[in-house]
Amino acid sequence: MSEPAKKPCTAPESYSPKEMPEIMKLAQARGSTEYPGEFILPDGSTPIPPEPGHNCPGYVTFANEFAYFMDYSGQGYGFIERNKGWRCDVNYTLADIVTGYAAQPCCLEVTPEDLDRLYRAVGFRERRVYDAASTSKPEMKEIIKHTLCELGQPAILNPIESRFFGAVVIGYKEGGDVLVTFGYPPYFIAPDNKEPQIEEITDWYQEKTALIIVGPRENPLTVKDLYLFGLRQIRDTLCAGIRGEDRHYYEEWERFLRLKTLEDMMAEARRLGYVPGAQMFGEESLDDAIRALADPTWCEASERRYYIMHFLHQLAQHFPEEKKALKALDDHFWYTCEIMGNQKKGYISKVGHDPVNMEMFAKKSVRRKMAKCVRKFRKADTKGLKMLEKLMERMGI
């Protein structure tokens, strides 16, 4: 393609960074004795309608953390009912889209810069991360107390054992030794999963603990501008994947699946230091990383395009004059989602998942069919990008 790839946008044009006071210094200045022994932040979350239903699948930890933070603090964008009672969290959708996560070519991780872009777009000046390597447990306790009692906002802590898909800290007991968390269970654990889980955790400070604090909110983009910003982010991320610096990810993923044997794949993964398509290795065993190329890769890739579909549906509420074109794009990204997610004829139709049938996965003919799905996925993204660019040109974006 001759058109140069556009770099993903990094911040709303109206954003100008300002210095935020060090939360840890403020917390230490107050002294721990000034905070109550226990505290629960008032619940500002959107009331759950009485009708039966369930939340849409949402497995992305950072997106859930953002959604729970926004919703519980009463600063969120609400929910949209769709598809026979499925309840889609607008906050989760925006997190997937504005970070660029939903439009990436494969299972790449979100970066700190991506997350900064998200929080800035909705009006937060800064997000601070404190890890166990540089922050002691007493210091973290004071930061959490300050955040809850003074800022009046939840704190984000990860990882939290048993809350693999994210939660936020909404309170504490016993001076901070016990933390109270808020989140929702995934639908496959609780089919009617609209009731939040409020749980207490005790052994929360570990070697890999990270505490994320979000500063004061000011001058967020209007909702309509936020959706336009998200639309640009989809375009720019797809453009980088189809025409630009990220296009090699599709190519590596397809080529990797076409290798002759699992042993060849193991050797290639060792050479690269990661598994193309799954993008994981590191602390994972190589066997687990290869298995991840089927599961959870299919789920991650499918859910990403699923949330582009939801975003476009939501966008149509703000631009009714483009409802027909957005419906066509919505349908297209549902098709793209199904290339990876359809369990009867999609990417994992021959190998299954949870657990993966490794005997089938070892067959070259099976992986060749999976590679064809990756090629279809890339072609679908290419078509989606062209449709999107045509729409945005007409809208003058």
Image: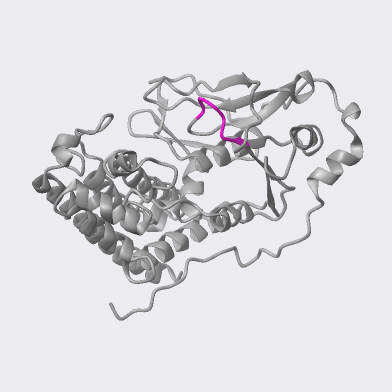
Judge left or right: residue 189 versus residue 141: left
Q: Which quadrant does the N terminus fall into?
A: bottom left
Residue 348 occupies quadrant: top left
Q: Examine the rendering and report whether any part of residue 344 can be seen.
A: no
- In the rendered structure, does residue 159 fall within the stretch colored magenta? yes
Q: The magenta stretch spans which residues?
A: 157-163
Q: What secondary structure prevails in the magenta region?
A: loop
Report x, y in % for residue 25: 85, 45
Which residue extends farthest bottom?
2
* Residue drawn 40% across the image and 21% down it: 189
Out of 12 and 372, give the one closest to the viewer.
372
- In the rendered structure, does residue 359 fall within the stretch colored magenta? no
Q: Examine the rendering and report whether any part of residue 102 can be seen.
A: yes
Residue 294 occupies quadrant: top left
- From what the image shows, is residue 336 above or below residue 46? below
* Residue drawn 33% across the image and 34% down it: 83
- From what the image shows, is residue 328 above or below residue 251? above
- From what the image shows, is residue 234 above or below residue 74? below
Judge left or right: residue 41 versus residue 4: right
Report x, y in % for residue 261: 16, 49
Report x, y in % for residue 87: 43, 32
Residue 112 occupies quadrant: bottom right
Out of 181 and 362, give the one closest to the viewer.
362
* Residue drawn 25% across the image and 33% down it: 353
Q: How are the residues colored?
A: one colour
Judge left or right: residue 13 versus residue 340: right
